[in-house]
Image (cartoon, coloured by chain):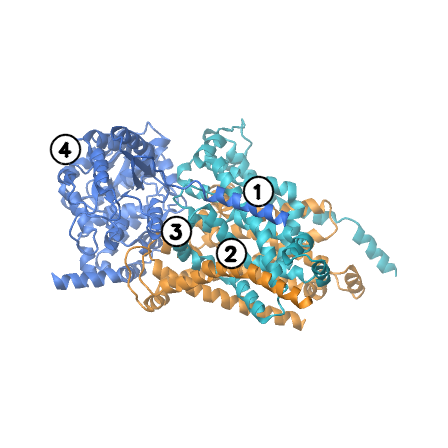
């Protein structure tokens, strides 16, 4: 009995050693970001060849690199492309994927729908590399090798994962709720919008976070679909203008920092929701 | 009355399902079929082409570059998976214990996950080219003063570090939520039986978080086998083709290189491999889970 | 229902915004000519050209694009059946593929071809995997690849330009003894390994080697071993780890005077000068052999224009070509990009090219061998692999094997052609 109370006491006490080592470890997270910031704010003449010189605080914080990088990568246009594509995909995912998740999830007693479900889920195993080249041809033929096409394709590629998430979640929502609404004379659509859709809220957050993270940072699809159209997303702009940075690493890092900042800001504001969303998605 | 309601409901469901399934079929399944079609030709992507039967497939198996890229990709994925899972588990155990600023620390460790792999690759590129050799020189370490990216013997390791830096974040989080499912009194009971330290972890904690281990293994393997962004920005497949991942090879050979048909065949093989591994992995890990 | 409606309206709106901004830039009453060029570094000059051309030709609207990785862009656009009217690329393996697939138009009825130096038209002819009738590109400017050197350092120590291989090695020893780095390399970017490779290969192999190998009469392994060994020997005189830094870093190192010489093409000069505008750069032919008479210049077509087969404005494209080909415009281009014109006539060459000019005037030049290697073969990576591992036998075997693998369709066509002619 004595043992147990001792145990409880040690458990309550915060463990300083572990806290210390975790703090030390977190430097490995900060270091690349610290390096990025230090280089981005210096001008090339301050980049002495020693690493101490590279990593030291800049003598004067210069915003010239940022101005130049913004001009080279057409930052505001690129940023708005990224926001448009990610935002639109997110909206499509939440509205349409939840709708189809509902339709399929509530029809699972039928064999056809079960097969259909497996068919779509199996799409998760299709590596983008295999459909990359046909997709280039198809989208061009249909005239959607543009931002609309990118959104459409994302909506299709994220369907398997989101369908799984929504149908999984749907199992927790009792059928009786819908039946009550239906008896009141509401159409299936109306039942969905007024009863089911609001109840799926926690899953909407997960789907939105996962879809947004995936599309925001994606390189391959915009790379093959938007190349040469003058429409860049933030990552693609870094790739496309890499050679224009030359050896001016300060300029390059200013541009990298600009590309990272939007996500950093969003993360600082909504880290709880993001973490929760990602964990929910992975575990389901 | 109920029948009528039901049939109305089925019709609506059908009306929702059909268009989306058609879209899915066109841009996913049809694309796969089309890719298979191209793999039987010597198509360059434009202009004329001939049907060449299985020639591309036969060539694939004798093409050292292709074989090497498979060896590299698998080696990379396995090492990365092991490394990431070990680090994540340790971090998760630490972050789940009674520590100060637990929330903030968790948020910090998750940060790399939200950043884009391509840009992170560029940042690490600079780190491996200038900072690390600089540190190596400062401490007079011969091995460190050469850039890891300059040698085919070490470049893969730089890629592992870069990818792992980001991947650890998500895996840690998944393990943390796994650890949360372990009720406190299980430990207390275990502690009375003398299970502490590593023994406690091995006999009590790990079996209980086995499902989360499964999730992490599957997630890791799948993501690492498809590694692309970091290859582009960190090594470009070099030096000496030592870091060409399969996805990178399909892109660079098929779209930039003009071997559209040939790389389509490569993509078909890759697809088959991914499906096989996914099924195998799920089966194997599921059966293991049931045993426990 | 209302919620649903408003959501879908929002969606439609978002979609229309997303798909808007189409790339067609038609202006009423004007014919648009679209040119995609891979000379991204000359984009400002091209924009000036376009502006002047459009002022002169009120009925036309010339649009010039110079995207990054333009050859991939051009190929992707061809895959999409959305080719521009004209393209400006190098005389390289991309040109080879495009000619072969028949997407380039025959411009033999264009009168300006008569002014082009014969040797450059021949270079293009040799790039056709299977000989065709017709002309498919207008060579515009050429570049040369050899060794760039720091004039000031050379003058300070009184070093002379070597004209034999042994002379070059001796010079390297001398430079090293003086405590300087003879060379800088940017071999982290695998394509830079092709610069010394090409410069050595032109003097050590004959240009018909490719055809002979394709016809099964010869093998690369009979000739490429010596080239590989010499290239590896050059690495011993590198001032840094040759594989740790990329092209940009090497240009910067050379510009800052960290190395006396840099084996790279003249195309690197503008980039080097952008780092250090005061640097005095000289260049000389890489002396691959010990008999100076057998050493020739590695020179190829850096930029040439083709009209696409499917273009509906061929006549208008010719007017663009005429404009580009005016002597004053060529002079402007070669001043800025430091290259050699393919047109006959007197032009002022940049000082750093003077030593090479003699070879050009005497027609002692040969095209870049890598322009004949199919790009999916990745010859640059093969060479880089050899330089890193030093496995010569494997390199030579792979080279012969990959050549046949990636050329099998061309070889078949070539054999058919040989039978019929």
Q: Is B263 situated above or below C266?
A: below
What residue does disc 1 label?
A: A263
| Residue at the far right in the pictured view | A1
Say above or below: A280 vs C147.
below
The shade of chain A is cyan
Q: Look at mark 2 in the image and give the residue it sits on.
A: A157
Question: Distance from label 4 to label 2 (Cα)?
Answer: 58 Å
Separation of marks 3 and 4 at Cα, in angstroms: 45 Å
User: How far across and how far down the image is residue B277, in percent?
Assistant: 51, 67
Chain label for disc 2: A
Between disc 2 and disc 1, whose residue precedes? 2
Which of pointers 2 and 3 indicates the residue nearer the eye? Answer: 3
In the rendered image, which quarter is residue C21 located in? top left
* SS state under label 3: helix
Whether residue B139 is visible to the viewer of this picture, yes or no, is no
Q: Are marks 4 and 1 on the same chain?
A: no
Which label sits in the foreground, 3 or 4? Answer: 3
Query: To which quarter of the image does residue C70 belong?
Result: top left
Q: Nearer the viewer, mark 2 or mark 1?
A: 2
């Amino acid at each position: 009995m004595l043992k147990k109370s001792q145990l409880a006491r040690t458990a309550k006490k915060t463990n300083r050693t572990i806290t210390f080592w975790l703090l030390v470890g977190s430097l490995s997270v900060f270091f690349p970001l610290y390096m990025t910031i230090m280089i981005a704010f210096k001008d090339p003449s301050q980049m002495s060849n020693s690493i101490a010189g590279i990593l030291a605080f800049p003598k004067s914080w210069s915003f010239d690199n940022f101005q130049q990088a913004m001009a080279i990568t057409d930052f505001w246009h690129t940023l708005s492309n990224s926001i448009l594509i990610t935002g639109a995909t997110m909206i499509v995912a939440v509205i349409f994927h939840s709708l189809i998740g509902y339709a399929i999830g509530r029809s699972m007693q039928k064999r056809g729908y079960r097969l259909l479900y497996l068919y779509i889920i199996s799409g998760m195993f299709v590596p983008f590399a295999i459909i990359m080249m046909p997709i280039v041809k198809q989208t061009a033929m249909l005239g959607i090798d543009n931002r609309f096409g990118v959104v459409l394709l994302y909506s299709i590629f994220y369907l398997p994962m989101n369908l799984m998430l929504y149908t999984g979640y749907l199992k927790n929502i009792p059928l009786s709720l819908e039946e009550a609404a239906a008896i009141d004379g509401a159409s299936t659509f109306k039942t969905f919008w007024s009863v089911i859709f609001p109840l799926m809220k926690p899953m909407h957050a997960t789907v939105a976070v996962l879809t947004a993270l995936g599309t925001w940072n994606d390189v391959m699809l915009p790379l093959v679909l938007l190349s040469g159209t003058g429409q860049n997303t933030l990552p693609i702009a870094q790739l496309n203008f890499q050679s224009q940075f030359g050896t001016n690493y300060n300029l390059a890092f200013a541009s990298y920092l600009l590309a990272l900042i939007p996500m950093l800001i969003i993360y600082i504001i909504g880290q709880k929701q993001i973490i929760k969303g990602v964990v929910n998605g992975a575990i389901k | 009355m109920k029948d009528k309601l039901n049939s109305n409901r089925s019709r609506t469901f059908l009306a929702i399902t059909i268009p989306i399934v058609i879209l899915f079929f066109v841009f996913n399944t049809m694309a796969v079929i089309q890719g298979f079609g191209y793999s039987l030709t010597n198509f360059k992507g434009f202009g004329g082409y001939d049907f060449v039967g299985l020639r591309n497939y036969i060539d694939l198996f004798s093409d050292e570059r292709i074989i090497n890229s498979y060896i590299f990709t698998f080696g990379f994925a396995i090492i990365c998976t092991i490394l990431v899972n070990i680090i994540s588990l340790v971090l998760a155990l630490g972050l789940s214990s009674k520590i100060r600023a637990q929330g903030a620390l968790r948020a910090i460790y998750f940060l790399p996950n939200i950043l884009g792999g391509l840009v992170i690759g560029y940042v690490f590129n600079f780190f491996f080219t200038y900072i690390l050799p600089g540190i190596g020189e400062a401490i007079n370490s011969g091995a460190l003063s050469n850039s890891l990216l300059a040698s085919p013997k070490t470049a893969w390791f730089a890629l592992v570090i870069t990818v792992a830096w980001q991947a650890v974040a998500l895996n840690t989080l998944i393990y943390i939520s796994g650890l949360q499912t372990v009720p406190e009194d299980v430990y207390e009971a275990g502690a009375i039986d003398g299970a502490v330290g590593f023994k406690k972890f091995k006999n009590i904690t790990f079996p209980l978080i086995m499902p989360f281990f499964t999730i992490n293994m599957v997630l890791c393997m799948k993501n690492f086998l498809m590694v692309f962004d970091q290859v582009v920005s960190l090594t470009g497949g070099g030096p000496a083709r030592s870091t060409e991942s399969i996805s990178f090879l399909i892109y660079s050979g098929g779209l930039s290189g003009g071997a559209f048909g040939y790389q389509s065949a490569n993509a078909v093989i890759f697809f088959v491999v991914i499906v096989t591994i996914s099924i195998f992995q799920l089966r194997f890990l599921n059966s293991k889970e049931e045993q426990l | 229902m209302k919620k649903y409606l408003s959501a879908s309206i929002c969606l439609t709106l978002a979609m229309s915004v997303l798909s808007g901004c189409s790339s067609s830039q038609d202006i009423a009453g004007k014919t648009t000519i679209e040119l995609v060029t891979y000379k991204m570094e000359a984009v400002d000059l091209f924009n000036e050209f376009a502006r002047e051309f459009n002022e002169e030709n009120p009925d036309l609207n010339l649009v010039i694009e110079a995207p990054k990785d333009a050859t991939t862009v051009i190929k992707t656009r061809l895959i999409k059946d959305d080719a521009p009217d004209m393209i400006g690329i190098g005389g390289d393996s991309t040109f080879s593929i495009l000619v072969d697939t028949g997407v380039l138009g025959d411009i033999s009825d264009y009168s300006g071809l008569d002014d082009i130096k014969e040797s450059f038209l021949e270079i293009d002819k040799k790039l056709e995997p299977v000989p065709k009738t017709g002309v498919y590109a207008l060579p515009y400017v050429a570049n040369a690849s050899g060794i760039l050197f720091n004039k000031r350092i050379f003058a300070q120590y009184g070093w002379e330009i070597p004209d034999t291989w042994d002379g070059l090695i001796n010079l390297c020893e001398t430079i090293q003894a003086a405590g300087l780095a003879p060379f800088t390399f940017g071999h982290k970017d695998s394509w830079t390994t092709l610069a010394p490779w090409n410069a050595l290969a032109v003097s050590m192999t004959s240009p018909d080697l490719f055809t002979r190998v394709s016809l099964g009469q010869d093998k690369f392994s009979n000739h490429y071993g010596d080239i590989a060994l010499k290239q590896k020997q050059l690495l011993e005189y590198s001032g840094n780890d040759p594989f740790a830094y990329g092209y940009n870093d090497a240009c910067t190192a050379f510009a800052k005077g960290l190395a006396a010489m840099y084996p790279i093409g003249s195309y690197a000069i503008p980039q080097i000068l952008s780092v250090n505008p005061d640097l005095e750069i000289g260049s000389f032919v890489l002396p691959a052999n010990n008999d100076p008479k057998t050493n020739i210049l590695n020179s190829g077509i850096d930029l040439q224009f083709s009209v696409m087969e499917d273009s509906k404005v061929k006549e208008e494209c010719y007017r663009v070509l005429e404009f580009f080909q005016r002597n004053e415009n060529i002079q402007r281009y070669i001043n800025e990009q430091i290259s050699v014109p393919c047109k006959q006539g007197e032009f002022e060459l940049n000082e750093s090219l003077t030593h090479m000019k003699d070879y050009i005037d005497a027609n002692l030049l040969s095209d870049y061998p890598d322009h004949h290697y199919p790009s999916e073969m990745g010859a640059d990576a093969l060479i880089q692999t050899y330089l890193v591992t030093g496995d010569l036998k494997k390199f030579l075997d792979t080279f012969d094997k990959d050549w046949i693998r990636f050329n099998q369709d061309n070889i078949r066509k070539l054999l058919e052609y040989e039978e019929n002619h």
